Amino acid sequence: MSEHKRIVIVGAGYGGVHAAKLLHKKFKNDSNIEIILIDKKPYHTLLTDLHEVAGSRIEPDSVRVYLHKIFANKKVEVIIDEVEKIDYEKQSVIGKDGEYNYDYLILGIGSEPCDFGIPGVFEYGFTVGTLEAAIKTREHIEEMFRKASVESNAEKKRKMLTFVVAGAGFTGIETAGELMEWTKSLCDKYHLDHNDVKIIVIEALNTILPNLNAKLANKAAKFLAKKGVEVLTNAPIVEVAKDYIVLKDGRKIETKTLIWTCGVQGNKCVENFGLELGRRSRVQTNEYMQAVGKENIYVIGDLAYYELDGKPIPQIVETALQSAETVVHNIVADIKGGEKQPFKPKYHGFMVSIGSRYAVAELMGVSLTGFLAMAMKHLVNMHYLFGVAGFNAVLSYIYHEFFEIKNNRSILGGHIAAHIPIFWLVLLRIYVGALWLIEGINKIQQGWLDPSKIFIITTSDVSGATANATTTATPVQTLQPLLKEPPAFYKWFMDTFVVPHAFLFQAMVVLAEVAIGLALIAGLFTFLASAGSIFLALNFILSAMADKSILWYIFAAIALMGGAGRAFGLDYYVIPWIKNWWKKTYFARKTYLYIS
């Protein structure tokens, strides 16, 4: 029998969550392996979307994925605590609320902004590195507009409406893009002239987006300029004060808002851990991602410092995910026996959004701009979320990024974000339901539930039944059929299944019409009833016995699918109850097949 092992992961960032899920897959049937994930927050934060929170494109809940959902029915124990130090002799991590022994420790506590020793950055500047920081930045920006709307002093007003983004890397450019869009809405809200708003991006290097090729970086710069964003390169900031910043060449820019995105360093709490550190407070590792001198301690993500080809590994999501994969492989090799593998990252490219409708991307050597780049960014985000929390997380992303977006700030504009009160559909729902119910009752009165009476097919020529198929199941009087004759596959279906069981299918048609009618009138399971309405209508069309008026039923049913039963219908009560019951089931929690 193998020895009991406890693997403790500190940090529920991209790397920590990925490592925990991989370890679950490797050891889910091994009772001797215990997996613990510790984080000071009960949720995983989508850090790459924080600029959208800061720029008020999406709400804070959009970037939270709760750990109890991610690891429901998984072999991962989630503990909410803040780790403060490590006792290497006892092999335990010590948090504010408890002490946790480990056999293997994975550190993935991420990074924090780095001020490079520039005075005033953290005292007067804002960041978007955490959800709390992004919310604080967002609230401050709107507060500047609110104050500017009642400020009579032109100089003070100019400072309030000047927004400086320090750093022209991915985060800086994406933040500037969000400000570029949001400030227009804020001007409308607070009755200000948008020409009074100034957005400035300041970069110490001679180019923006240095990780992209020059052509894409230039396109991004031109797009920003076109939208009125000023970009200053070769302009290091040397001082930050309450009402201004100072550049290395002596220029002073007056502003009440500096958003600092000039780089990150390892989380400073690791300085209390006594581990060997590399540059910028990152933990030095070997090629197996082990902390130097600690064989059973591994480091992943932004916290890890390891050089490849003379350059430190980048602090990006792909590094976090791939370093987690390397670490999990090596821990499994330690426990089960096997050969460790060195960290050899394979980066697929970079994507940068500039506002909600434009992006630049370089993916596996292919350059993309505009709609395609933005669409690819959304697809990559959804792919990641599907791996983290499945169907539920993807639906939530689509909902927040497209259906609940404000001020048309999505790749599709506001076309699918427009909302109408569903009570306007109540009368349509009842009317369509009444038509189906009346049609079903008429058929019952005609004897459709009498096995001795077959209406659904003619019996004079059974071998050619489908050619002579005659149905009175259509809820309209057929004049000129949409199809001259049923398609070949439908004839085969009739001959093979319907003719031998004519009464069964006949009764099913009648009962379906009655059930659909009652469901729509009551507003119960309206989506399913509408889908049934479409299904019946399509069958009537394929039978070549329905004229164009049947199409009305299809399009009316599509309109009713958008929640028409939630207004003056039983769905208002039933659907929330079913959702709450379903998401508590073992199957739903295990597969993420539910909607929050």
Image (spheres, rainbow, N blue to C red):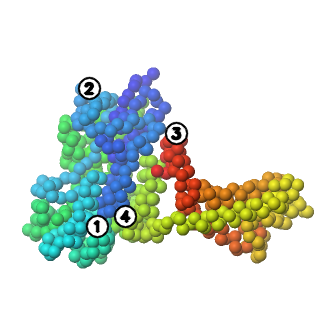
Residue type at numbered disc 1: Leu
Residue contact at pointers 1 and 4, CB within 8 angstroms: no
Instruction: Name the N-terminal-most of marks 1 and 2.
Output: 2
How far apart marks 1 and 4 lie (CA) works out to 20 Å
Residue type at numbered disc 2: Lys
Q: Nearer the viewer, mark 2 or mark 4?
A: 2
Instruction: Name the N-terminal-most of marks 1 and 3.
Output: 1
Residue type at numbered disc 4: Ala
Residue under label 3, please give it: 586
Instruction: Name the N-terminal-most of marks 1 and 4.
Output: 1
The quadrant the N terminus occupies is: top left
Residue under label 2, please give it: 90
Task: Tell me what residue is drawn at x 28 percent, y 46 percent.
Answer: 110
Numbered label attached to residue 361: 4
Task: Tell me what residue is drawn at x 70 percent, y 63 percent.
Answer: 436
Label 4's element? strand
